[in-house]
Structure formats: structure tokens, C-alpha cells
Amino acid sequence: MSTPPRLAVIHTGGTIASRPSPDGRGLTPQQAPSVPGLDGVQVHDVQPFSLPSPHMTPAHMGQLAALIETLAPDHDGMVVTHGTDTLEETAFALHLTLNVPVPVVLTGSMRHAEEVSWDGPANLLDAAHVALHPSSRERGPLVVIGGDIFDARTVTKIHTTAVDAFGGYPGPIGRIDREGRTPRLHYFARPEPRATYRPAHLNARVEILYAYAGWTGEGYAEAEARADGLVIAALGTGNLPAELLPLIRATDKPVIIATRTHAGPVLPVYGYAGGGATLVEAGAIPASFLNAHKARLLLLILLGQGLTREQIRAVFERDEF
Ligand SMILES: NC(=O)C[C@H](N)C(=O)O
């Protein structure tokens, strides 16, 4: 008799575990959900935290990675339930640090268990099927929401309330549907090799600044003084008002230029003061196509690994993430 597949479900909180609190003060994580309708699978539930995801920190992400590494040898697939607000950050932190052969799939819900349109059970079942499917191996941590399968590098939350709240450029890398009770899973591309990192700590201070028309650098000097590195959500292909150029030139800390635009790479093409070409010439590092909060996590991890500014530049330039 063959042994049943073993699935670990790691619960961290979020709306998928939330209900209206009895004191009428709004939704709070209260009860981890169970996977519905998974016959013939040995499910092992673990609950390291019960957090709304805005309370998630890099330290929690590090604890989660360590837990996944401990559980991986005894499981065939792993699901992580998570609040959707910072789900993409945890997924990316795991993508950068985890090196386990077992598929790891993050999911959450946009509606809570007492709403008529609760999306938790279907997302959880989809995530479980994806995690146990052999084609999900070697792809790094995945995110499954609304039947779409995303990779951790590009996925992002694109809507505050819709059930299909996740997207990102260029979009899903796969799709899961069910024919009756049978899962039908398709991937649109082959797995790719990816770099992983082993930071000694996740304590570096990395702050994000958000650019806007008329910004003359308010907040920059304070952030630069206290942080180990900065990320700027800059304009378009990675441009800033002219006032930022001398400020960036004056620091030898890593300053990563991401974009506040929702898709596309940062390219140092403009030569006017503050244009991307001048920022790079002044020492800034383009974030490639990572959004500001993912670029922040990569920088945090590279600083925790002890990399110099030039080594950090090489990682971003070569897309080693
Ligand atoms: N849909 C959700 O899970 C949102 C919730 N605020 C969270 O991220 O914990």
C-alpha cells in the first residue's frame, strides 16, 4: 500500500484566519482554517503565529524560513496561509533564502469566514493541490490566489478588496482549476534556476522613500543618516527631481532606485539632473523590475550577508534574485 502524500499547512494569520471580533471592533485573526475536501492526504497543521500581515516583520519571515526548512524533509508539499497585505514580501523573502526541494505555496483570502463569498477554502484547496503537484518543484515559493499561480518575484497585490487581488507584470505563471474533484494544473513556463542567500541577520535598517512631483528631498537626509541603505520608489524609468542628485552623490550607502510605476524595469536613460543616467553615475543602483518593497527585502538580505555596495550592485544588475 502506498503512503499518502504528506502536506504541512503553516498558519500565520491574515483574513483567511479572521472573523469579526466579539467586541465589535473589526476583523482580527482568530482561528486557522482547515483544508477542505483533501482525501487521502496526511495534513499536518502548524501555527507559528496568528498575525494580521501588517504586523509581519523580516524577523517573522526568518522564523518562517527556518520552520519550513525543519519541516521540509518530512513533507511532500507545504502551504503557508498569510494575510494578503504583505504576502508578497514574505513570499519574496522565502524566495531569496529558502533552498528546499519541496514546493512551498502561499495563499490567503480577501473575505473572512463569516462572509457569504468567503474565498478561503477554495484558495486553501488550490494551494494544497499545487503544493503536492510534481510540476511545482524547483520553482521557488509560489503564490496561489483565485486559481492563478504566481512566482514570488513578480507577484503583487493589485486590489484592496477584490477577490482576484493579485497580479503583477507579466502575470500568472500557471493556473489551477478543478474538474469535479480532480485538480487540473497548467504551468506556462519551465522552472528556472534561482540564487538563494544565507544572511547572518535580518537587522539592517533599510528605508523606502516615495518620489513625487515637487519633491525636493524632504525626509531624505534623516533617512540616510539612520539607515544602512535606502530604496527610492522613483518616477517612470527611475528618475527624480534635480534636488535629489547631490544628496545621492554624497552618500556611500547603497541607494536603490525602484519605480513607483506598476510595471517595467528601471533603466538609466535620462541625462537631465536627476534623470536615471545621472543617478547611476552618482552611485545609485537600479532595482531592475523589483518593486520598492521587494527591492528593500533584497537589500536587507544582502546587507545581512555582509555584501559591499559594489557587490550589491552586481546582484541587482545581474538579476541574481
Ligand atoms: N486579506 C487580508 O488578509 C488582509 C489583512 N489585512 C492581512 O493582510 O492580514
Image (cartoon, rainbow, N blue to C red):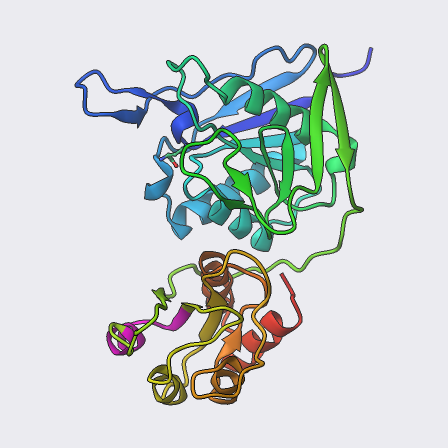
Residue 142 in the figure: left or right of residue 166: right
| Quarter that holds the N terminus | top right
85 relative to 205, above or below: above
Which region is colored magenta?
220-231
The residue drawn where x is 67% and y is 16% is 41
Q: Nearer the viewer, residue 197 or 133?
A: 133
Tell me the quarter of the picture where residue 144 sits.
top right
- The image position of residue 286, as x and y in percent, is 54, 73
Q: Nearer the viewer, residue 106 or 178?
A: 178
Is any atom of residue 144 visible in this view? Answer: yes
- The image position of residue 284, as x and y in percent, is 48, 80
Is any atom of residue 200 visible in this view? Answer: no
- The image position of residue 18, as x and y in percent, is 36, 23
Q: How many marks?
A: 0
| Quarter that holds the C terminus | bottom right
Residue 75 in the figure: left or right of residue 179: left
Tell me the quarter of the picture where residue 77 sits.
top right
3 relative to 259, above or below: above
Residue 205 colored in magenta in the image: no
Q: Nearer the viewer, residue 125 or 149?
A: 149
84 relative to 220, above or below: above
Residue 220 in the figure: left or right of residue 140: left
Residue extending farthest to the left is: 23
The residue drawn where x is 39% and y is 28% is 15
State which image quarter holds ligand 1: top left
- The image position of residue 202, as x and y in percent, is 42, 59
The residue drawn where x is 50% and y is 16% is 34
Residue 222 colored in magenta in the image: yes
The residue drawn where x is 56% and y is 39% is 68
